[in-house]
Amino acid sequence: MLEKIDALLVEVENFSSINKDEIEQFRIKFSGKKGIINDILAQFKQVPNEQKKEFGQKINTLKQAVEAKLEGLKSATTSSILFEKDDLTKPGFPSELGSRHPINLVKNRIIEIFRSIGFAVADGPEIEDDWHNFTALNLPEYHPARDMQDTFFIETNPDLLLRTHTSSVQIRYMEENEPPMRILSPGRVFRNEAISSRSHCIFHQIEGLYIDQNVSFADLKQTIQFFTTELFGKSKIRLRPSYFPFTEPSAEVDVYWGLNSETDYRITKGTGWLEIMGCGMVDPAVLANVNIDADKYSGYAFGMGIERIAMLMYQMSDIRMFFENDKRMLEQFKTL
Ligand code: DAH
């Protein structure tokens, strides 16, 4: 009897099929009502007492082997049934390719240009404190220039706000590093402004900072000219005197865009010139706030809006397009 069960075990082990009918026959043969297992169990009574234990274990092993076999074949057939049904020559589901966002394309290009002349990338938080966004940048409380940047404050803590510009990263970097330093900080900034085709409450800026011995205004001008030549292919620039609390002297940079087309005429308002950034020599008061010796070191800083530059480069007329995620717009940047 025991040998018979051993032989059945081998039979179970060796059985294999992906045919549903054959598998069902196998099930009936072993586990059916009048199947082998029930048949053997019926003979259990006649087994001498001293063999009952071994016999019982053998039957259990056989029962489990049959169950495991059926389970294995069932999962094999479900996948092979799927296989039979599928037409493998059919074209696959189209998977859509994404594209880089124009803001990132422009940001990466600007970083690449400045990296080639030794600028590293530095980061700072979007939720900033008053010191880094304003006070250390020579904008103490009640300074009228604070109104130039309508600020979102964090209601539960009057010292916290959403940074209004990436100039805050200058302060953070200068606090933690020793000159010489040459950094670029791209990031999101926030202003409590009405949304229109020209302005948004969220946008992106890139800040630049260079501090070393004997840095001059000529270095600043030369660097910016290198930048506009690389980015736009335009080397004619002009620096208009301006005011920023954190730089002295300060300037706004215009690039000569030309008047070659109707669009050029429109976007430059007939002048040929376009403003692209603010800049200046870092105010000694700012250096003092971060414990850098203004007698030994000097430096320049600049800041520009990425949306503005992207709109120029891609001839886009509405800043809101950058935030709407309209695929028809985004898909146009696939090959860039
Ligand atoms: N932070 C200024 C703004 O948001 C931009 C700027 C102007 C940054 C002059 C500078 C700078 O570093 O020197 O309008």
Image (cartoon, rainbow, N blue to C red):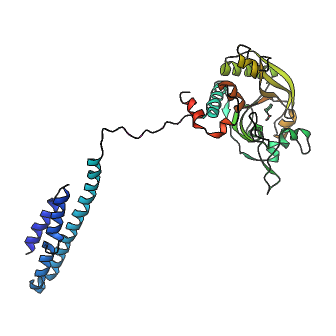
Q: Relative to the observer, which residue lies in front, 101 or 55?
A: 101
**Residue at image x 84%, y 37%?**
286
Whether 92 is among the magenta residues is yes
Which residue is at 12% across, 77% downward?
Answer: 40
Name of the residue lying farthest toward the top: 260
Return the x and y of residue 193 as percentages of the image width and height. Answer: 79, 41
Quarter of the picture holding the N terminus = bottom left
**Could you say which is closer to the camera, residue 230 or residue 307?**
307
Which SS does the magenta portion mostly show?
loop
Is residue 22 shown left or right of residue 331? left
Q: Picture quarter containing residue 70?
A: bottom left
Instruction: For ligand 1, give the image quadrant.
Output: top right
Magenta extent: 91-99
Does 257 sit left or right of 20 as displayed?
right
Q: Residue 302 in the image: state x and y as whole percent.
A: 77, 29
- The answer to whether residue 256 shows anywhere in this view is no
Q: Which of 186 and 318 lies nearest the eye of the viewer?
A: 318
* Residue 126 at x, y percent in the picture: 72, 45
Q: Is residue 230 visible?
A: yes
Residue 29, above or below 134? below
Asked if the stretch drawn in magenta spans residue 56, the answer is no
